[in-house]
Image (cartoon, rainbow, N blue to C red):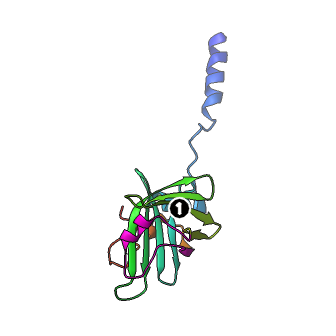
Amino acid sequence: MRRLALALVLLTGCDRPTAVAKQPTGGAALEQAARERGLVAAATAPSGVFQTDTDRVCLSPGPQGVTIGASVDYGEGQRCVARGRAVLQGEQTLKVDFGGDCRFDARLEAERLVFPPVLPESCAAACVGRASLSAITAARLSDAPAEAARTRGADGSLLCPG
């Protein structure tokens, strides 16, 4: 009798569906796939392309932190191109390091990136002519890391190479 009861208990458990890890479907699956391929920004690090007129800035997260590139192009012989690293401190401060002593804090304000009006003198090394990286205020065009990685500077090279 005990064996029969045990067999019935075991058999009744067989018709229950086993727990399977839920995979995202529909829009959630599409969003996940886009994030994995770098087409949509993840919320963990700042990323994207910012541009106003000929001022362009890209932020591209990677294994060694966030790559930043800035380009200003005012025509023949008047341009700046700088590449370096950035770290987000808090929600709005972006600590920018373009190498040498060209280090400063930029601000992320809603949908724009703002460089300070006065930068260290060493930042002038990234510029030719009378162009300057000072006071760049660029509006967000995209928050996709893939677009940031494809942005080119005034020198024709990638600003945020991956």
Q: Report the residue that reaches farthest toward the bottom.
A: 76
Is residue 1 shown above or below 59? above
Is residue 82 shown above or below 21? below
Going 45% across and 76% down the picture, which residue do you hit? 132
Magenta span of residues = 117-140
Which of 29/19 is in front?
Answer: 29
| Residue 78 spot, x, y in % from top left | 38, 84
Going 47% across and 73% down the picture, which residue do you hit? 133
Going 36% across and 69% down the picture, which residue do you hit? 125
Which of 9/142 is in front?
Answer: 142
Is residue 139 shown above or below 95? below
Going 39% across and 80% down the picture, which residue do you hit? 79
- Indicate whether residue 127 is drawn in magenta: yes
75 relative to 138 in the view: left or right? left
Q: Report the residue that reaches farthest toward the top.
A: 2
| Residue 91 spot, x, y in % from top left | 63, 55
Q: How many marks?
A: 1
Inspect the image, locate mark 1, and give the three-letter code of the amino acid beneath it: Ala
Q: Does residue 59 appear anywhere in the picture?
A: yes
> Mark 1 packing: few (<14 Cα in 10 Å), some, or many (20+)?
many
Which of 47/78 is in front?
Answer: 78
- Indicate whether residue 119 is drawn in magenta: yes
Is label 1 in a helix, a strand or a loop?
loop
Q: Does residue 159 appear anywhere in the picture?
A: no
| Residue 6 spot, x, y in % from top left | 64, 17
